[in-house]
Image (spheres, coloured by chain):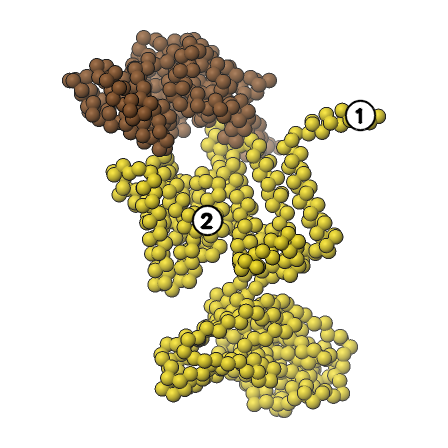
Amino acid sequence: MFDPGKMIRAWRAIPRLSAVTGTLVAASAAIALLKISVWQVSPGDVLPHTQYSVRLTMRLDGNDDSVVVRSFLPASDVRQEIRDERVADASLSHAVVTEGLNRKMIWTGRHVQDGVLLSMSVDVMSRPIAYDIDPGLELPPSYPLSIARYLKPAPNIQVDSPEIEEELERIGADHGTILERLGAIHTRTSSLAARPFKGTTDALTALRLGEASCNGKSRLFVALARQAGIPARLVGGLVMKTGTTRTTHQWVECYVGGHWVPFDPTNGYFARLPGHYLELYTGDEVLFTHTRDINFEYQFWVSTELVPSSVTKGVFGSLNVWGVFERSGLPFSLLRTLLTLPVGALVVVLCRNVVGVPTWGTFLPALLAAAMAETGLFWGLLSWVAVIAVAGLLRSSLQDLNLLHAPLLAILLAFVAVTLMGVAVIADFIGNAQLSRATIFPIAVTAISAERFYMSISDDGMPGALKRLAGTAAVILACYLVMNSLAVQMLLVAFPEVLLVVVALELYLGRWVGIRLSEYFRFRGLLIKEAG
Amino acid sequence: MRRPQWLSQWRRMLHRRKEVVGINERNVELIYRHNDRRHFPIADDKLVAKQVLSELGVPVPRLLGVAHGLHEVNGLLERIEDEEHFVIKPAQSSGGQGLMVVGEQVERGVWLKAGGGDVTLAEIRQHVANIVFGAFSKDRPDRAYVEERIRAHPVHARLWHDGLSDLRIITLNQVPLMAMLRVPTAASGGVANLHQGGIGLAIDIESGRTIRASFRGRPIDRHPDSGAPLIGVQQPEWERVIDTARRASQVPLAYLGTDIVVDQSGRTLVLELNARPGLEIQNVNGRGLGTYVEEVLR
């Protein structure tokens, strides 16, 4: 029999908190499932992409006469997407020209001063690519004229040399299918010993020495492939790794079944390339050509940032959050910070109530960890500790004046500001770009830390205050690791509804009455020792 | 086969874990559940506590005067001009901050201070003004009050002569759960708080005898400065102490820590109430509160 009273009683018997917690988790799972099943959002699609920012900086000394510098600009293709090309230069004029398949940037100037800096930067979204070569594919009887030129010898690619011919025969690449020939050539060239030689190595030299750097291996690959009847060309570019580098890279493309298929004998990629390769030019070219005697130097600076995929933008579009961010010109990193902050707060709650680490405030460590995403953990913590040390010193010198609270804190704020400026000056002096970002530390958060430390010295004494400082630093570290973890960020950007689970966990922790880890130590006498 | 030792230790720990009350459990199960926030002022403000306790007929130190604001500072000073042996306290400080213990008057307007030195009327005025201004209550305006100075009972004075030993009794629903005596040391500077270097002595509630003593987390059996034995000391007026604690626990704070002193003439006086009593009493007693809590709530 249906008995409404009984049902209401049964409903009431469920503790309210469990009901709310359960609802939140269920809602979160339901939204995620809906997205996956109805909107066909596969987790792979919504994951943010790594976007590389590549900046090329060149330095040169002037010349009484005119100065010309040429380099290549990357172009978008099926594997890489180039956007936001920016050129900054004060004293030289520049122009972009197309030369064959390549885009060339030419800077020119007259009566240029010494130490001129030229820079240009691009944002790159690239993805790995792999080709399946049909194992039965034979060499075609002929190639179109535009392709056939990639079979001819070149000054550093001695296709018609008898030694290349003999080698091709020896490794068995002179017969068989395209796949068999390329396999043998790839195996041969990638087995050459590595050679940290910066200059140009031609194909024959690489073969004779049995060792080569990337350009020698690639030229030998091209020479053998052309001799085997497969059109091949060199490709030059950059292997993008965060940080600064002067090392560029060369690899190979072969014309197979109507496509230019990549091979990298140096790093062992056969018919595929990973996502962090940036192609700058094709052909046996030199990356930089310039007027003589200008003391030319260059450097690449690569940084990465996660950006949402277009699918994610669509998901946010339905709530219009992403749209608003884009229209207002707010950076993606801000959205990321907003999404990860609640998770950071959860980490603080775990550290405080489950581990038992003493900290200042609940949000402070999470906010500081978010700020340190800009500076990096090491420099961020260092400048934070510097500000706190200033607060400590200030206290010892102002203590006897018995100042009222508000004016005292105002003085503290002034010193925090000066300290941050000092950090910027030191950062510039030692040439640390990351440290200089400490100045954009949210000054409120930094000042509050200084205030808490200052007050903590009066309330808990110096040892207590230092203990709390160490505890706060440890929790900042934990927050930083979680909030800056790629997995957590991708999960939150793709499935922001996970925040409901975070709230559910916090509800649970709000009623959790277990013993904190630190209390196992505090009450060890009661918990561990023999009775008596 | 013999079971490894760590396994039995681990099992014992898991079992005893239920007996020990941690901060989370104290806050959720004892304080939030039994102590309504709106009644916290009874414990957090010593003047409110004094009034509520007097109405319940619980003995408290005699109040000599109160300054509710700067305009009452001079009135308070007029009232104590001729007094000797009194204590000046902020109503809302914690951990004994802002306490000034004054002894006999050596000349008009000059008194001896506990712990050496003397203090003038002008200095007392400055101190009272600081209290009222909030110097000891995180900048919130406070009230200053003056009460009689308590002389320690000889049993307690024999343990250590400087400062005042007090008894902390924890009650839940008016049932005493645990008790300890806190004794000052040379290091604690006349204050008996455990984290400031006082000694904690566990007291058997039935008999009123001390059964354990711990100093800075280590068990001891003699006072580190005076050498007085600390174990097996019968507490004076014990039945009256327990009765006082029971009566004080009639305030609407079901989970309560009551601080009681026994004075020279055997009076049991409540100094302070605490709505969030600390958990160190468990280490002092060598037992967790959990079992007792369960018994009371059953």
First along the sequence among labels 1 and 2: 1
Q: Determine if residue A232 is in view.
A: yes
Q: Left or right: A177 with respect to B105?
A: right
Quadrant of residue A423 in the image? bottom left
Q: Nearer the viewer, residue B186 or B114?
A: B114
Q: CA distance from mark 1 to mark 2?
A: 55 Å
Quadrant of residue A499 in the image? top right
In the rendered structure, find residue A3 and report the number of the disc placed on it: 1
The quadrant the N terminus of chain A occupies is top right
Q: Nearer the viewer, residue A273 or B74?
A: B74
Residue A461: where, in percent of width, then height? 34, 36
Q: Determine if residue A240 is in view.
A: no
Q: Residues within 10 Å of mark 2 (few under 14, many from 20)?
A: many
Q: Is residue A279 above or below residue A1?
A: below
What secondary structure is found at the residue carrying circle 1? loop
Q: Is residue A117 above or below residue A10?
A: below
Instruction: Kindly identify which chain the residue marked by label 2 belongs to.
Output: A
Q: Left or right: A61 with respect to B173?
A: left
Residue A209: where, in percent of width, then height? 54, 83
Query: Residue at the location (65% across, 35% down)?
Result: A20
Figure chain in brown: B
Instruction: Kindly identify which chain the residue marked by label 1 belongs to.
Output: A
Amino acid carrying label 2: it is Leu
Q: Which residue is mark 2?
A: A368
User: Which shade of the palette goes to chain A?
Assistant: yellow
Residue A192: where, in percent of width, then height? 58, 77
